[in-house]
Amino acid sequence: MAEQFDLAEEMTDADEAGPGTVLVLNEQGALTVCTRSYDSRVAGVVSGAGDRKPALILDRRDPDASGSGAQRRAVAVMGKVWCRADATTQPIQVGNLLTTSSIPGHTMAANDRDAAFGAVLGKALTPLASGTGMVLALVGLG
């Protein structure tokens, strides 16, 4: 399940928030690319990467209806979605809790349980041994 959200004004490059990108809330409640580890502002993953398309998209509306002119993205807030992943310092294993990474737009394994409280994106359904790539995640914010 995805929900449409406004992207932050500073996000002028549409590709910056492409499918699989991990997003966080900014101070105005709009979404921007994550840039720090264990960010409790995590909001979800841009839907549509790989073979996963959202079955249900909530809050669909004309982006100009609010008059803000903000770009909007369908963001997975529950269910399975492919997301950009960072396994440069630790591998991601099936079942690992996932959180935001300091690599922009990526997730990583949440091995520090205290830091992960409130910053969990979901759970890894596929592994990533090293480097960066894509993992299938079961999104369940918490």
Image: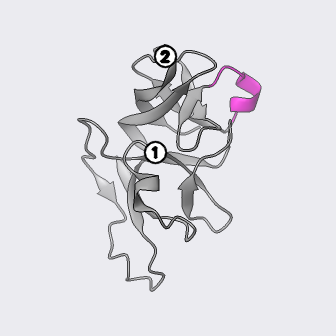
- The picture places residue 133, in percent across and down from the top left corner, at 43, 28
Q: Which residues are magenta?
A: 110-117
Query: Which residue is more in the foreground, 116 or 126?
Result: 126
Residue at the (49%, 67%) spot, across then down: 12
Q: In what element is the residue under mark 2?
A: loop
- Between label 2 and label 1, give the one nearer the viewer: 1
The residue type indicated by label 1 comes to Thr
In the rendered view, tell whether residue 121 sits above or below residue 42: above
The residue type indicated by label 2 comes to Gly
98 horizontally vs 5: left or right: right
127 horizontally vs 121: left or right: left
In the rendered view, tell whether residue 77 sits above or below residue 117: below
Query: Which residue is more in the foreground, 35 or 125?
Result: 35
Residue at the (56%, 57%) spot, across then down: 32
- The picture places residue 96, in percent across and down from the top left corner, at 54, 18
Task: Give the residue number, with chain letter if any, for mark 2.
Answer: 95
Query: Which residue is more in the foreground, 2 or 88?
Result: 88
- The picture places residue 140, in percent across and down from the top left corner, at 49, 36
Q: CA distance from mark 2 to mark 1?
A: 20 Å
Query: What is the number of the mark on residue 21?
Result: 1
Mark 2 crowdedness (10 Å alpha carbons): few <14, some 14-19, many ≥20: some
Residue projecting furthest to the right: 114
Q: In what element is the residue under mark 1?
A: loop
Q: Does the magenta-highlighted stretch encompass residue 70?
A: no
